């Protein structure tokens, strides 16, 4: 039951088991619940690493755009903005 519903904790599973007639303590349910190997969402470290990569890419794109606008006129600048936006 804990594998099918990973967000359910021992109290919820204990209550569901009581509803179907299985009498077991909440401590026993907690003891035998499946442990999940990874967190359900990304960690702060992952978020910060991905965010720093995104910021770095935007900074590089901005520098390329600035250099292109100095060298040529608007058509190149518009095409670079379209490329960066995607």
Image (cartoon, rainbow, N blue to C red):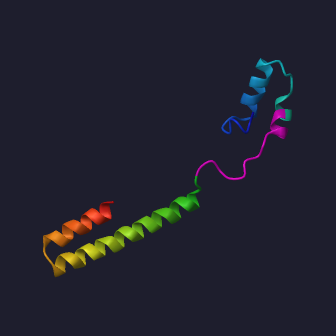
Of all residues, the one furthest to the left in this rendering is 73
Relative side of 9 to 30, left or right: left
**Which image quadrant: the C terminus?**
bottom left
- Residue 28 locus on image (x, y percent): 86, 34
Tell me which corner region of the image, top left, top right, bottom left or bottom right, holds residue 84. Answer: bottom left
Task: Judge whether 24 appears above or below 41 on screen.
Answer: above
Q: Is residue 38 left or right of residue 50?
A: right
Marks counted in the figure total 0
Q: Would you say residue 27 sits in the magenta stretch?
A: no
Q: Nearer the viewer, residue 86 or 65?
A: 86
- Stretch of the chain drawn in magenta: 29-41
Rendered view: 8 above or below 74: above
Q: Position of residue 15 (x, y in %)?
A: 75, 24
Residue 82 position by quadrant: bottom left
Residue drawn at (49%, 63%), measured in percent from left and top? Answer: 50
Q: In percent of the image, x 65 and y 51: which residue is there? A: 39
> At x 56% / y 61%, what residue is drawn?
46
- The majority secondary structure of the magenta stretch comes to loop
The quadrant in which the N terminus is found is top right
- Expressed as whole percent of the image width and height from the top left, the position of residue 42 reads 58, 54
- Examine the rendered structure and indicate whether residue 39 appears above or below residue 47: above
Q: Say whether residue 74 is left or right of residue 45.
A: left
Percent x, y of residue 4: 70, 36
Residue 30 highlighted magenta (yes or no): yes
Q: Is residue 42 shown above or below 23?
A: below
User: 58 left or right of 20?
Assistant: left
| Rendered image quadrant of residue 8 | top right
């Amino acid at each position: 039951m804990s594998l099918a519903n990973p967000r359910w904790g021992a109290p919820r599973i204990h209550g569901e088991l009581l509803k179907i007639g299985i009498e077991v303590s909440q401590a026993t349910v907690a003891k035998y619940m499946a442990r999940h190997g990874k967190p359900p969402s990304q960690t702060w470290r992952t978020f910060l690493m991905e965010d720093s990569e995104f910021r770095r890419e935007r900074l590089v794109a901005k520098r390329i755009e600035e250099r292109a606008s100095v060298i040529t006129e608007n058509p190149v600048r518009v095409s670079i903005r379209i490329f960066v936006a995607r």
